[in-house]
Amino acid sequence: MNAMTAYRLNQVPIQSLDAFLEHTNDKGDVVFLRALGEPPNVAETVRSLDQTMAERMRGGQCMYLRLPEELPKFTSLEDTTFYAKAYDSWRAGGGISLQTACANPQFSQVLGQATQEVLNRYQEIKAGVTETILKNFAAKLWFWTDRLLQALLPQWAQGRCVKVAADNVQKEQPYLFCYLLTLLGCDVLLLNTRGDINTKEHLKALSAPLALGPFGNSTLPSFLSPPPEPRKPVRLAHPDRPSASPSRPVHTQRSAPVRQAAPTRQAAPARQTAPVQRTASPSPLQEKSFEELASLASSIVMIAVHDDKGEPVATGSGIMIGRKGFILTNCHVVRGGCFFSVRIEDDEQVYSTNEVIKYNSNLDLAVIRIQRELSALPLYNGRKPLVRGQKVVAIGSPLGLFNSVSDGIISGFREIDGVDMIQFTAPISHGSSGGAVLNMAGDVIGISTAGIDRGQNINLAVGYESIRLFAKGFY
């Protein structure tokens, strides 16, 4: 019996959540279950499930994971390159290398067989799948495995009790990732309170349905991991420094009719995002006056983009995010530039650089560096959710007018091309891209990214949560 087929799927009928919790895979049987609809007191039901599994984890009986509704996205070129190379090595006959260490060499074989099975299933439902599409999907599967199973992988062993619950899995790729987890020996429970998976019936049949009630729109409570057992103190390593990306930015294509004060993207319906863990220290709660907020313009820069002949071809804005010369801006601002000149308020010197340290075209974010010590603006730590109607101030250099200040409110929240965006009314124009959107305490809550030409004061900013993920290590 080979490594992958050692697990048999849904051999035992499961007719309740309690039965799922009590199931063991000591005979090689795993469960893939779709719990459909909302039971009475759905929040308490989910909390009870989490609490039961947390107690079992403390007792060493089992491992338990709750996957968020939105699985993580690639945020760096380094990660993309790593998994692309891992795929090429695997296709050439080598083992699969992940960033999280796994002491059991058998895991690479099991993961390889599971990945091939999932790719085969994916080809069944997608016409015209190319090798590049398969490579990208495999990279995403391994990236999710690395990020979501970090605590499990070093202890992986066949027959180990691992249970995974996932919130509202309705898209095919996350569904197939959950199927991959069953092939790695995990019992998987989909908490589909809002609707069933949208896919072909033969793929849906991989998991067994369990009706809990009618579909609703409740937000499931977040899972709080149990506190670890007391341990002797250890010395922590210094955080990794951000890795450098190629010095030339990527070329991105935009298609929607928004002016190039931002990436042109197709607007999508608003949605609520799950809360994420915060690590930054709170900044002062006291609101500043508009005059005090305007004084923060000294931490916003104007960026001129130069072509290969040294001629300026565009301007944009940037936000100081690190004392050692790091400046956050939009990817579309630096796209195609050969070098950049940076102006800082109350500094007569113009700083020239061709260092693009990091970029992400999907988030439309980039970091450049100049040789100067900077005064970074604080990034909002999410102590309270942002709300519509909240006052904001935007600072940038529209049309080359250095560090103009405008005020407005948050008018909505949008998801555009999979990226969470803040819609705000503070006026911006061409050249404002990369500027700061501040709350009234002076924290950066977003980076000005787009404006809709057909509307009046309909502007968009990439939110602080995406900035925090992208700029981790620079502050």
Image (tube, helix red, strand yellow):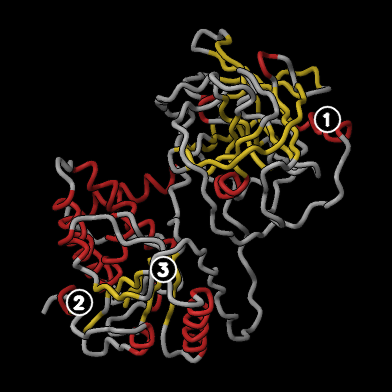
Question: Where does residue 106 sit, x and y in percent of width and height?
Answer: 25, 74
For the question of whether residue 439 can be seen, the reply is yes
Q: Closer to us: mark 1 or mark 3? A: 1
Residue where numbered disc 3 is placed: 149
At numbered mark 2, what does the secondary structure look like: helix, strand or loop? strand
Q: Is residue 387 left or right of residue 174?
A: right
Q: Closer to us: mark 2 or mark 3? A: 2
Q: Earlier in the sequence, mark 1 or mark 2?
A: 2
Closer-to-camera residue (151/353): 151
Q: Earlier in the sequence, mark 2 or mark 3?
A: 2
Taking the spot 34% from the left edge, 70% from the top edge, the residue there is 36
At numbered mark 3, what does the secondary structure look like: helix, strand or loop? loop
Q: CA distance from mark 1 to mark 3?
A: 45 Å
Quadrant location of the N terminus in the rendered image: bottom left
Q: Earlier in the sequence, mark 1 or mark 3?
A: 3
Question: Where does residue 98 sit, x and y in percent of width and height?
Answer: 36, 60
Q: Is residue 5 left or right of residue 396?
A: left
Q: Amino acid at mark 1?
A: Ala
Closer-to-camera residue (395/134): 395
Q: CA distance from mark 2 to mark 3?
A: 21 Å
Q: CB of mark 1 within 8 Å of CB of mark 3?
A: no
Q: Say above or below: 429 vs 235.
A: above
At numbered mark 1, what does the secondary structure look like: helix, strand or loop? helix
Closer-to-camera residue (179/328): 179
Q: Is residue 426 left or right of residue 256?
A: right
Residue where numbered disc 1 is placed: 294
Taking the spot 44% from the left edge, 50% from the top edge, the residue there is 73
Label drawn at residue 9: 2
